[in-house]
Image: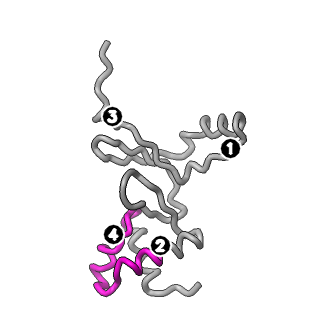
C-alpha cells in the first residue's frame, strides 16, 4: 500500500491522541488540512484496520475509539462518570487461563473494554 497524505494524517493523529473517535481524528486533521472530510477518515481507518495497523475498541455507546495496533491494554470504563482507565492486559491472565482451560477459549484482552464503576463513583462499603 502506498502511504497517502490522508493515511499519514490519520496515523499522526493517532500517535498524538492515542485513542480517538473518527470525529476526533477528523477535527485533529482538519486543524492543518481543512479539506479532509469525515468520509475520508472512516475509509482510511477501515483500510488501516484491515492492514492490522490500527484497531478499534467500543468504550461504551457511540462511535468506536481507534488506536495504533501496538497500543494494547484493557480499558476500564465507568458507566456513571465516563472515566476510562487503562490497565495492563496481563491483569486478565488468570481469567484468560480459566477461559482457555475450561472452555477452550483464547481471550484477546488487547481489544477489550470492561464497564463498571470507578473508585470515585463506587459508594463506600458500609460496615
- Secondary structure under the numbered disc 1 in the rendered image: loop
Determine whether label 2 and label 1 are within 8 Å by CB: no
Q: Give the distance between the C-alpha atoms of the residues marked 3 and 4, in whole angstroms.
A: 29 Å
Does residue 116 show up magenta in the picture? no
From this view, report whether residue 50 is shown above or below residue 123. Answer: below
Q: Earlier in the sequence, mark 1 or mark 4?
A: 4
Q: Nearer the viewer, residue 80 or 62?
A: 62
| Image quadrant in which you'd find residue 90 | top right
Residue 51 image position (x, y, % from top left): 59, 73
Residue 77 image position (x, y, % from top left): 38, 45
- Secondary structure under the numbered disc 2 in the rendered image: helix
Q: Give the distance between the C-alpha atoms of the residues marked 1 and 3, in whole angstroms.
A: 30 Å
- The region drawn magenta spans 17-44
Q: Give the distance between the C-alpha atoms of the residues marked 2 and 1, in whole angstroms.
A: 28 Å
Q: Residues within 10 Å of mark 2 (few under 14, many from 20)?
A: many
Q: Residues within 10 Å of mark 4 (few under 14, many from 20)?
A: some
Residue occupying image coordinates x 70% and y 38% = 103
Instruction: Answer with left or right where residue 54 lies relative to residue 85.
Output: right
Residue occupying image coordinates x 28% and y 43% = 81
Q: What residue sits right under mark 3 in the picture?
A: 119
Q: The N terminus appears in which quarter of the rendering?
A: bottom right
Residue 45 image position (x, y, % from top left): 47, 73
Q: What residue sits right under mark 1 in the picture?
A: 105
Residue occupying image coordinates x 33% and y 78% = 29
Q: Earlier in the sequence, mark 3 or mark 4?
A: 4
Residue 43 image position (x, y, % from top left): 46, 77
Q: Give the distance between the C-alpha atoms of the residues marked 4 and 2, in whole angstroms.
A: 11 Å
From this view, report whether residue 72 is shown above or below residue 68. Answer: above
Q: What residue sits right under mark 4 in the picture?
A: 23
Q: Give the distance between the C-alpha atoms of the residues marked 3 and 2, in whole angstroms.
A: 33 Å
Q: What residue sits right under mark 2 in the picture?
A: 45
Q: Residues within 10 Å of mark 3 (few under 14, many from 20)?
A: few
Amino acid at each position: 500500500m502506498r502511504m497517502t497524505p490522508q493515511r499519514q494524517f490519520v496515523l499522526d493523529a493517532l500517535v498524538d491522541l492515542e485513542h480517538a473517535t473518527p470525529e476526533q481524528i477528523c477535527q485533529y486533521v482538519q486543524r492543518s488540512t481543512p479539506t479532509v472530510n469525515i468520509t475520508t477518515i472512516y475509509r482510511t481507518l477501515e483500510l488501516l484496520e484491515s492492514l492490522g495497523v490500527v484497531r478499534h475498541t467500543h468504550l461504551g455507546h457511540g462511535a468506536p475509539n481507534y488506536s495504533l495496533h501496538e497500543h494494547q491494554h484493557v480499558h476500564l470504563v465507568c458507566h456513571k462518570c465516563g472515566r476510562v482507565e487503562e490497565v495492563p492486559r496481563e491483569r486478565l491472565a488468570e481469567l484468560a487461563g480459566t477461559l482457555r482451560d475450561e472452555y477452550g477459549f483464547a481471550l484477546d484482552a488487547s481489544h477489550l473494554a470492561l464497564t463498571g464503576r470507578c473508585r470515585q463513583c463506587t459508594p463506600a462499603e458500609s460496615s
